[in-house]
Amino acid sequence: MVRTCCVLGCNVRSYDRHGNKVGLSFYAFPTWKQHEGAHVSDVTKRRRPAWIAAVRRADIKFCYVSRYQRVCSRHFHSGKPAYEMDQTNPDWIPTLHMGHSETRTSHSDRHRRRTQRQQNKVLFGGKRQPHPQPQSLILKVTGADAENIDIREKQTEDQQLTNDCVRCVQSRAEINRLLEENRKLKSKLDKTELNENFLKGDTEKVKYYTGFTCFAIFMSVLENVKAFLPASKKLSHFQMLLLTLMRLRLDLPVQHLSYLFKVSHKTLSSVFSDTIDVLYARFGILVHWPERHCLQATMPPQFTDTFGNRVAIIVDCFEIRTERPSNLKARAQTYSHYKGTHTMKYLIGITPQGAISFISKGWGGRASDKHITEQCGILNKLLPGDVVLADRGFDIRDAVGMMCAEVKIPAFTRGFCQLDAKDIENTRAIAHLRIHVERVIGSLRNKFKMLHTTMPIRSLLPCEGEDVTFLDKIVRVCCVLVNMCPSVVVKPGTHETCTC
């Protein structure tokens, strides 16, 4: 019975003329093993095209070999392919009866010598043994002929060794040059990529891009929020936080940030929204009303000299521009005559030390300071005997008096030709201390330039399942970040620290 090899087309007999079965095997093309280490992957990747080149079939490609295309045992010296890692074995690729004359010669002699060397290492403990010479050759080569042969062999070996040494030196120099070039390029790439190496060790960069005073504060914030940030295939948690702070701090356009972080416009907007939500939930509590004994223990001297230790809070309002609403009622509620445009107004309160201790929700720009103060819930935090410093627009004496507290505002000059000496002195003292809240507002708006831009209408809509808007979250997060920085009111080391 005659059977045909699927690849090389040779005719071989599966049974001899007496009906006995002839030993014949068929072997598939080797596969590229990519998951067993770099060395195995490299050897198997070279073996597969070597088989294809030896077979010389136009329909067999590296990327596709049919499972029905096989090579029979007639094309191997030992009747089967060699082990895939034994590259010097003549059966590493098929070489016999290939049907063409361009196949490389067999490596049987080379394989035999290699096997002999390995056996010698085992027998003689790694010592190199001289190759035995035939006795007849030794008898014929004598005298001057032997000396000439030794000289020629030595010259040939020296010349080959010199050539090998020169090539080794050149190769080593080229490798060192490429390694040094790779190191420099990697260093430049690390400086341009927006990762930890971009900010680490550069305080000025940290201040400019994040507003924090040092890299350690940034990493502390990251450690507290990274477990709650959503997973992203294109951005790390470090980049999510950095992206959010850069947008708050510098008010960079979304398209520009998309190019910097190499993400789409939609992905960047989603990451910014999710990160603000996490910062609001995790750090919103840092804007809190301190206990009375904490306020008294850290009261700056200028407040103590004027009002004792009774000042609890300094209040004022600031406004953020918004787009013009399409709804007529909303348009009327958000229009601010003071700014001449549509705004959202926030009541902010600071402690005598300059820390933000209260921030209200957003109100339409038409709302008065008095109305916001009475409705935002700040009065419920006052204790009997507390003093509130405010501007003339805060006509809240009655509301504050209901809480057994007192409000201090500059004296009104309308209807008076001149204030008496006592009113002038009180007004000067109140104005001198109340100015600190304006300094904090200025620091808040200058540190986070996003509060200067015109906010879109969608940021004024209540968040799903919450009674705050996205703009409220942004403002509160900015207040928290300001509290993480040194106070603009009191310099470090000029007042006592509360140990509670």
Image (cartoon, rainbow, N blue to C red):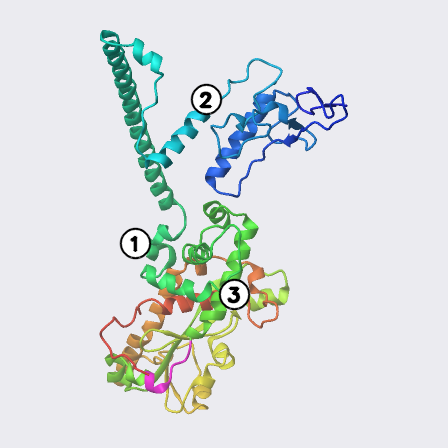
Question: Looking at the picture, does residue 256 appear above or below residue 381?
Answer: above
Nearer the camera: disc 2 or disc 1: 2
User: Which residue shows up at 46% across the image and 69% down it?
Assistant: 476
Q: Is the residue under label 3 in contact with that under label 2 (CB below 8 Å)? A: no
Quadrant assignment for the C terminus: bottom left
Task: Tell me which corner region of the image, top left, top right, bottom left or bottom right, holds residue 438.
Answer: bottom left
Earlier sequence position, callout 3 versus callout 1: 1
Name the residue that disc number 2 marks. Answer: 109
User: Which residue shows up at 23% across the image and 11% down it?
Assistant: 147
Name the residue that disc number 3 marks. Answer: 277
Earlier sequence position, callout 2 versus callout 3: 2
Question: Looking at the picture, does residue 15 appear above or below residue 219?
Answer: above
Amino acid of disc 3: Asp
Q: Nearer the viewer, residue 50 or 365?
A: 50
Q: Position of residue 93 (x, y in %)?
A: 55, 26
Left or right, 451 with respect to 487, comes to right
Name the residue that disc number 1 marks. Answer: 201
Real-space Cα separation, disc 2 to disc 3, in angstroms? 73 Å
Write the start and end of the magenta stretch as one range: 288-294
Q: Position of residue 123 (x, y in %)?
A: 36, 35
